[in-house]
Each structure stands twice: as structure tokens, then as C-alpha cells.
Image: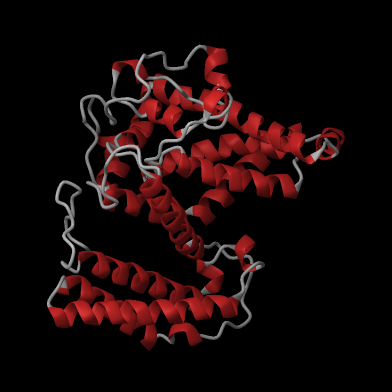
Amino acid sequence: MFGKIKSEKPIKAGSGLISGLIACFLAILCFLGVLSFHFPEYTTTPDLRAVYDVEFIRRMMFGALVVAGSLGMLNFIRGKSRRLGLIACTFVLASIALGGHRVEVGDFADDTLYIGLDWFILDLLGSSVIFILLEKLFQFRKQSVLREHWQTDLNHFLLNHLIVGFVLLSSNMFVHDYFGWAVSDSLQGFVQGMPFLLELFIVLLAADLVQYWSHRAYHEVPVLWRLHAVHHSVKHMDWIAGSRQHVLEIFITRALVLVPVFVLGFSKEVIDAYVIIVGFQAVFNHANVQFNFGPLKYIFVTPQFHHWHHSSDEAGLDKNYALHFSFLDYLFGTVVKDDKEWPDGYGVVGDYVPDGIVKQQLFPFTWKG
């Protein structure tokens, strides 16, 4: 939609590109928000509906429509990035035609299969604001926000959020059907009786043990590597790079991690905290940031630790599998050992994974390697 914008070409002040992209970004999110107002039973996430402040969202949407429309019109009139201005104005007008921020939401069914359109909007807004700011303040490698192949990763980000309803439903059904026999009321009561921090540590450790060994299998079992190679094909590490995943890998990993969570029966408060930590760490550890964590790096996975996992350097291949606790790789002998603090480059050795979300989803079934 936006054409090819590569990080090698610096963005010139006054070109209208930045304002045009902001206008398009806001206008498209507003349009998706209007669709969510019209079809909440199919486009919104049940867990989020209970915490929405609808009036606040309406005010935010109105402000975003004004900003997007103003920037779009300004670009079009000035002849600066007219295409982006036209796209922004088109989505603003479409949003207004469909009712804009005034769309009324009536009663609706609460048990339908849904796509996470609202989760996509909120997560994209929150993640982009927080992590782009962090990457500018604590930047590791000099890199444009609109670096090469950013559109592919944004498409993965969208796809992953849209299928969240299906993935949650299908993985929950799988775990309940095949592991219901392992549930023990006494064990779950014992777990839920733990202090909050201990229970949180246990759920993170249990999940990471599953993720460590499944992650290792993705690297060591050829048929699984076909799926995981898509994730490793990213050549520029930043906040959105971790979104590049094959949909089958998302389902398999989520289903496996749900097994100990379901069987041990952690409390809702702990699960909520776990989801927040996982979401933050998944983005943060791919981000283009550099912090000094001192001795904590031997306990927790950090951006530096995970960047090595994505490295195309020989020293980083098939290493650093843990996603939460780095001590697991020290324990199992798979930690990177190199004199350099950071890797030189990223991506799959041989660069054989194609670019583009459609080609990457088809890749595991078409690769003849």
C-alpha cells in the first residue's frame, strides 16, 4: 500500500513522508476501530471488552480522525507525498461515512468466534509508541524505524493479531481434550495457595522449560525448522521483528505452553501478570536497544542475549534458546560463548527464505532444501 520505503534512503525533512505515514497510520486504525464498533462480536477480544472505557475511545478516535484528515489534506494540497495524503483522506472519509466515533454499540452475542482487531489496534499503538521511543533513546544499531522489509513484519503483526481468537480457541480445545486427565484439584489448590511472586515465578519457569525444549526442537528437527526459519529470516532486529512467525508455529508453541498452565491451574491474577510479562519481553528482547543489566543477564533473557540467538554469526547458531530465564541455557550448555558482546549480523545463513508474508507462510511446504 505504501510502496517501497527502505532504510538505506534517509528521510528528508519537508518531504511529507513522515506526516503522510502518520496520517495513514491513524486513518487506517480509525477505520478498523469503526469496524470494531459495528461488529464487536466478531472483531473484539472478550477479555478486553470488560475493561474498555468506550467514551474515552470515542474521544481518541475523534482526535485521530481530525489529525489524520488534517495531515492528509495538507500533504495533498502541498503536493508532498500526495499518494499518502490521498490514502489517509480516503480512510478518514470512509470512517466518517460509516459513522465515525459516533457509532452506537448495542447488545451482541458474547460467544462467537472472533478476530482480534481491537487487540491489534491497541497493541500496535502501545508497542509503537513505547518501543520506538526506547529505540531512539537507547539505540544499539543506527537504523531507521522504516528499515528494509518493515512492511513484511507489520503484515505478520496484523495476521498474528487477527488469528488470536482461532488460536486461543483451538489450542485450548486441544489441551482440554488431551490433558484433562492430568488435572488434580489438590495440586491446583496447592499452586493457587502459593504467594503471588512464587506462583508467578513457577508459571514463568514452567512455560520457559516447555519453550526451551520446543524451541530447541525447532532448530534441531528439520521439519520443524521449516516453520521456524521464517522467524529467523529477519535481518534487522527491532520491536516489530519478533512478529515474523509462521501461523503453525504460533499454534504449536501456544498449545504446548498451555499444557503446564492448564494442568497446574494458576490463579487468574498470576495468569494476567504472566501475559503482560510475556508480551513485553517478546517485543523488548527483539528491540534495537542496548542496556547494561549487569549480573541479571545470567538470570533473565535480555535483548543482547536474544539478539545472539538471531545471529548469522557462527558462534550464535543454535544457541540461547530460553525466552524468559537465560540460566536455562547455562544449565543445558547451549549458551553463546564468544568474545564479542553483540553479533555482527542477523538472518538465516544462506538467505533462502523469501520476503513477503504470503511466500513465507507457504515456504515450509515449498522449500526444497
Residue sitting at 63 percent across and 65 percent down? 111
Q: Position of residue 260 (x, y in %)?
A: 67, 33
Residue in the foreground of this view, choosing between 355 and 29: 29
100 shown above or below 120? below
Q: Position of residue 134 (x, y in %)?
A: 43, 48
Q: How is the image coloured?
A: secondary structure
- Regarding residue 186, the answer to whether it shows in the image is yes
Residue in the foreground of this view, choosing between 284 and 314: 284
- Regarding residue 179, the answer to whether it shows in the image is no
Image quarter where the C terminus lies is top left
In this picture, residue 159 sits left or right of residue 265? left
Q: Position of residue 364 (x, y in %)?
A: 31, 35
Residue in the foreground of this view, choosing between 295 and 122: 295
238 shown above or below 91? above
Q: Quadrant of residue 13?
A: bottom left
Image quarter where the N terminus lies is bottom left
Residue sitting at 57 percent across and 20 percent down? 328
Residue sitting at 36 percent across and 36 percent down? 231
Q: Position of residue 289 (x, y in %)?
A: 40, 40
Total numbered labels: 0
